[in-house]
Image: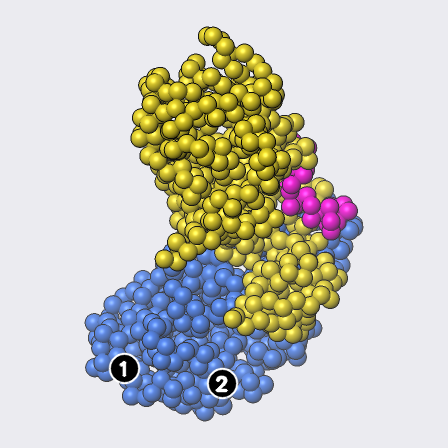
Amino acid sequence: MGYPHPSHPKETPVLSKHFGDEGARTFDGWVQRGGYAALRKALEMTPEAIVEEVKGSGLRGRGGAGFPTGLKWSFMPKGDGKPHYLVCNADESEPGTFKDREIMRWTPHQLIEGCAIAAYAIGAERCYVYIRGEFTEPLRVMQSAVAEAYARGALGADVFGSGKRIDVVIHRGAGAYICGEETAMMNSIEGRRGNPRIKPPFPAQAGLFAMPTTINNVETLASVPHILNRGGAWYKGLCLGNPKSTGTKLISVCGHVQRPGNYEITMGTSMTELLFDMCGGMKPGRTLKAVIPGGSSVPIMTAAETESCLLDYEGVVACGSMLGSAGMIVMDDSTDMVYQIWRLARFYAHESCAQCTQCREGTAWTTKILERILAGKGKPSDLDLLLSLSENMTGKTICVLSDSCAAPIVSGIQKFRPEFDAYLSGARQPALAMA
Amino acid sequence: MTERVTVTIDGAQVSVPKGTSIIEAAKQAGVLIPHYCYHPSLPSPAVCRMCLVEVEKAPKLMPACVTTVTDGQVVHVNSAPAKLAREGVLEFLLANHPLDCPICDQAGECELQDYTFQEGRAAGRHDDYPKRYNPVEDFGPDVLYVPNRCILCTRCVRFMDAVAEDGVLNVSERGDRATIGIFPDRELDHPWAGNVVDLCPVGSLISKDFLHKARAWDLDRTASVCPGCTQGCNISIDTRDNTVVRLRPRANLEVNRHFMCDEGRMHYRWMNRGDRLEAPLVLEGDEHHAVDWDTALRRLGQMVRGGAGTAVVLASGRASLESLGWLSRLLGRYQLTAAVQVPMGDEAPLAGVPGLALRAERAPNLQGARVLGYDAPWASALSAAGTASLVVLLDVSLTETEAAGLAGAGNVVVLGTVESGAWTRAGLVVPVTTMAEEHGTWMNRDGRVQRYQQAKAPPGMAQPAWWVAAGAMATVDPSADTPTSAAQAFAALGAHWPELAGLSYQDLGFSGRVAASAMAEAVR
């Protein structure tokens, strides 16, 4: 169906098939649409067989890192006698990304079913769904769906009479971007300050409550029932580009396109097709200037770089950026790149957890320099200073928030330097008044 | 036997137990890796990122505090990428750090100052912005928090959480707005809270007691032992111009790790008393007259020789093994009743360090006194003193009633530091040094014999009590082999008390040794 637009013929609606379909939200409605067959099937399989099936599908983490999901599950220790945990990352705090929100809003049982299968596959009896604090509607929908799933035996002490226990607990975040980072999320669930942890130990060794834990993104888990229903081979076949990137991917497109929204594409679809066919291209009279393809944390791409870009993990990397969470921010020629980069830097400065020195001080300092440039008070040496600080902020901290702040600054200066120079030389009127 | 691995750190090969962190292995190799958040007695969060080092074959710089060594590992602490990373961290730390070193108590012993001097940038690039400002906060009885100087290393938070187990501190806010916070309606008043001041690598947590009292470079530091209780925490006595200005813990992993309690920390003013006894006094008629040491020692020798039967020694719990031992030898001809005074107080354990507590018995040498035979109950020793032929008071303070009880005693000799009511009847009063003014040893509750060193000059003619005892002995028996130094006084004790046999100042070093019998007792 699609939401808010009907599915485009070039889309491959698997996850988004029932977006906009209110009937799919209830347990019965979901069952009528083929739901919970995968969970029933999974309960008759061994956990190892499920892991193998998911490995065979080529499914990779949809939260941004793209780590093979089956492999991640296989890292969970076996027969260790400890409680295992599954955490569903529904924090979706990456700017420009809004796909998980729609999955939870329209097809909550798709996610619950995926959680239950994954929990069973990794030997967990409990799954925490960590929902972003700002997601009030998805929270409400998920809460009633979980209650319904318990009432109908899809969750609880004896899932569908199999004797297996699977609990789903919804944990609501309080609005910190960093809590979308998996180890910060575990701290947050434990009731601590949401600071990322050092790895090792990795979550599969000692994660939530120091027990073996797997963390998966909403979209990843929602894909699992389809893989079990239709087979890993079917999923692996959904591939137009690099064979290492398989299946469908929800792309959240926002910014200066005619039809912003979520688009579900087969991996390897070209970016041009997405932007100009599915999204209807730029607004009249405007041309494409830049795209941030994977949420705000990845390098900015110029219009030229997008032309040959295939939308899969390898394709975007080949064009100088990353697929990330596939929250695509599209900017046309009316965009002030310096201003946009400052907005991003300011976001990271606000959200830095304050643990690591480079991030705590670096994000704030770079923001101030960009502010000065925008206010027409920049110095000729400021760009070199920004690049030098960005270098000091990259690859040196516990998590990648600091790197994420540096990435758009570095790529922005490299790719759109004349715009910075225009502010520095006074050719461009100040866009900000400095406090 | 734990498995050992060999690593190369800046060209030096070291063999360390498996599981050692790079930062600790580097210490073995003689390389100090600059760090802020890491502390050997706290959990490591690896947040300051100062200890990033280059590890061959690792994709990026690794935090030395949480990266464990592996066999054959090659680490570069002073390679260009590692130095550049540290320079970057220092620049970021200084971006909001006030340059108020001239009025900061930490100046001179500040790790931010030191590392910036060593390898920071010659000039900052943050010149145009006003620095972050937050007002000074009063955290508790002795601790002020100066947020502007804070580098958010979180040592204080981790100490309170993981060691004191009284989590009153936190990191409040995020990003560059973050500061150390204290929970509402809570105070930093844990009995061991003062350690956060020592742990703070910069001048952010400072002691009210030490506030603006002295500059670090004007201090003389003396290795000593806390006189506060039977725990025997290792300390440093910091003096300025012969005045004790603060006590700080000195690391001893076997006794107090890196900590000391606030009561011990604050209990030093008595070392600076000005009303000290400065010359030996002999009683002539109703009045005491000052005499020289020769006269005083001869008088003491006469008193010892002239009496017979019972003698009683009432000694301070702070008296050294040397003093107690030689006094006991001086009185060898008597039937001796000896006791030490043990002030009692509340016990205050440090939860995160098993075996470490402020002990109820506020007498640092209680165990040593017992070993040397000073084991009579205080009350019975007092009553025995009432009829004894000779009573020796070693730096004790008696109540009026207690002092009155000595009326029936034969001779009363006082080895004292400050005036007390018991003097009136004393035939001889001689000035002795306090633990701050002499070299000596104590045995703590676990049988560990530990040295303390002389931190300041004694007032007037005051001498260690062992010197007085030995000097008097020489007048009684000129052929006796009497010591001329504290080291000799200590070494000679072993011949009379087997528990101390074979021990010397050299063996004890700066962290002490557990005496043999105490060890055997512990095993039993």
Residues indicated by labels 1 and 2 sit on the same polypeptide chain: yes
Amino acid type at mark 1: Gln
Q: Residue at x 51, y 73 (%)?
A: A251
State which chain is coloured blue.
A
Q: Earlier in the sequence, mark 1 or mark 2?
A: 1
Give the mark toward the camera: 1 or 2: 2
Subunit of label 1:
A
| Applied colour scheme | by chain
Q: Nearer the viewer, residue B86 or A29?
A: B86
- Residue B68 at x, y percent in the picture: 57, 67
Q: Residue at x 47, y 45 (%)?
A: B497
Q: Which residue is mark 1?
A: A32
In the rendered view, does B220 fall on the left or right side of B267?
A: right
SS of the residue at dot 2?
loop
Give me the C-alpha separation between circle 1 and circle 2. Answer: 28 Å
In the rendered view, does B352 fall on the left or right side of A340?
A: left
Subunit of label 2:
A
Label tally: 2
- Residue B178 at x, y percent in the picture: 53, 46
- Residue B420 at x, y percent in the picture: 44, 18
State which chain is coloured yellow.
B
Magenta segment, which residues?
A: B97-124
Query: Residue B99: within the magenta?
Result: yes
In the rendered view, does A251 fall on the left or right side of A272?
A: left
Residue A58's label in the rendered image is 2
Q: Residue at x 65, y 74 (%)?
A: B72
Q: Nearer the viewer, residue B370 or A28?
A: B370
